[in-house]
Each structure stands twice: as structure tokens, then as C-alpha cells.
Image: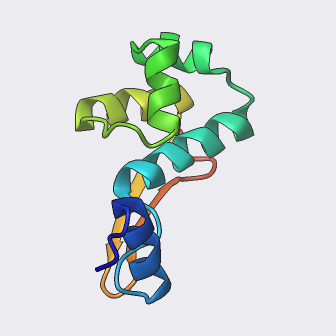
Amino acid sequence: MVQHHPRGMVRELAEKKMIPAESLEELVGRAVRERRGKTGMTQVRLAELSGMTQAAVSRLEHGKCMPTFPLLERISTAFGSVLLVAVEPGRGVRVTFAEGDAV
């Protein structure tokens, strides 16, 4: 019997369209990293504005942790942008920051 690494199984199932290719933690992390890049904000500055450490921001951006709703609100406030999380039937979850929307 061949044993698969859990991450390998996730990718395999994703390719078959059975589950999303990215975990929710990875989707949130990518959205935060992309927004930070668009705004030119450093991890240190985001940490200061959201009450986190730079190391915690890095872990978040790499999908290593799931933030709480209060933390997501602080991150949204730090960016001055609305954070949108959409659950779409048959399409999975989408996490983005709204362009140009101030909090």
C-alpha cells in the first residue's frame, strides 16, 4: 500500500477538483501578503498597526496559522480596506481586500 503525505493528498484531490488547492489559512495569508505588497507596507509596519509581532505576520502570510475575526478586523483597519471572504457553492472560498474602500 502506498502512503501519501497529507499535503500531497491535498494537491492530488485539488487537481481532481474535489477540494480547493489552498487551505483557508493559505488563502488568508496570500490575501494579506498581496495587499501588503500593493500598499508598500512592511511586515513590521503591519505588525505595529495590528498589534502583532513581525514573526506573527510572517506566519500568517505563509499560511501557518488561522487568524481570529478580531485580528482580521485589526488587519483590515491597518490597510484601511474591507476584507471580503466569500464562500461560493462549487467554487470554494475567496479571500480578498476591496480596492479603494476605506474602513
Answer with left or right where residue 87 lies relative to residue 11: left
As drawn, which residue projects farthest toward the front?
1
Q: Is residue 74 left or right of residue 27?
A: left
Residue 14 x %, y % = 44, 78
The reply to whether residue 6 is in sight is yes
Q: Is residue 75 above or below residue 55?
A: below
Above/below status of 68 relative to 74: below
Q: Is residue 82 visible?
A: no
Q: Nearer the viewer, residue 101 or 13?
A: 13
| Front residue (pair 96, 60) | 60
Query: Which quadrant holds residue 87?
Result: bottom left
**Residue 44 is drawn in which quadrant?**
top right
Lateral position of residue 97 relative to residue 42, left or right: left
Query: In the image, what residue occupies the spot 41% across and 73% down?
Result: 20
- Residue sitting at x 39%, y 69%: 10
Q: Position of residue 90 (x, y in %)?
A: 34, 88
Name the foreground residue: 35 vs 100.
35
Q: Give percent across and percent down for residue 62.
A: 51, 39
Q: Quadrant of the N terminus?
A: bottom left
Classify 89 as above or below 21: below
The colouring scheme, among rainbow, by chain, secondary structure or one colour, is rainbow
Residue 64, x across and y down, in percent: 40, 38
Question: Residue at point 45% right, 78% down?
Answer: 12
